[in-house]
Image (tube, grey):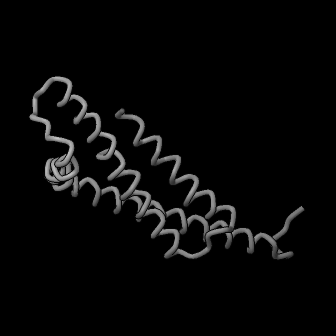
């Protein structure tokens, strides 16, 4: 369970930011940065929390460490129970967002440098046999 969020974040970043950027489908810097931030927030920050909540709920039900509510109050119970978890993980989500923004900015900068080098190498005076 600890490795799945890391692998998911890498795969999502590869599919939604890096691959479209270097294939030429994503040319806008703002679009790349927003995509990187969203992937950092959703996949890197919130996805591990959503993985942990059902596992903790099943452990609480199995070992009777927490009184379980009736079926009519189940959603409200889990919302109030998970609020402290979301408050505590908000700094982690913020760090993931900032890391995603930073990586997307750096990848876009690399993409621009590659484009500039490709255009500079096509100048006939610089070609050497």
Check the image and report above or below for 40 versus 3: below
Report x, y in % for residue 77. Answer: 15, 48
Report x, y in % for residue 71. Answer: 21, 43
Report x, y in % for residue 61. Answer: 19, 29
Q: Which quadrant of the rendered structure holds the N terminus? A: top left
Residue 103 location, quadrant: bottom left
Horizontal side of 17 relative to 44 (left or right) equals right
Q: Nearer the viewer, residue 128 or 45?
A: 45
Horizontal side of 44 relative to 121 (left or right) equals left
User: Residue sitting at 36 percent across and 48 percent down?
Assistant: 47
Q: Which quadrant of the rendered structure holds the C terminus? A: bottom right
Q: Nearer the viewer, residue 42 or 9?
A: 42
Horizontal side of 76 relative to 122 (left or right) equals left
Check the image and report above or below for 91 versus 125: above
Q: Nearer the viewer, residue 67 or 23?
A: 67
Check the image and report above or below for 93 versus 105: above
């Amino acid at each position: 369970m600890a490795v799945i969020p890391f692998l998911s974040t890498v795969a999502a970043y590869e599919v939604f930011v890096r691959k479209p950027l270097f294939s030429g489908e994503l040319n806008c810097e703002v679009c790349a940065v927003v995509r990187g931030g969203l992937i950092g927030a959703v996949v890197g920050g919130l996805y591990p929390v959503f993985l942990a909540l059902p596992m903790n709920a099943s452990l609480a039900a199995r070992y009777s460490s927490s009184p379980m509510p009736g079926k009519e109050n189940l959603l409200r119970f889990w919302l109030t129970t998970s609020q402290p978890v979301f408050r505590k993980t908000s700094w982690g989500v913020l760090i993931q967002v900032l890391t995603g923004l930073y990586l997307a900015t750096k990848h876009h900068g690399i993409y621009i440098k590659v484009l500039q080098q490709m255009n500079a190498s096509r100048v006939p005076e610089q070609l050497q046999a």
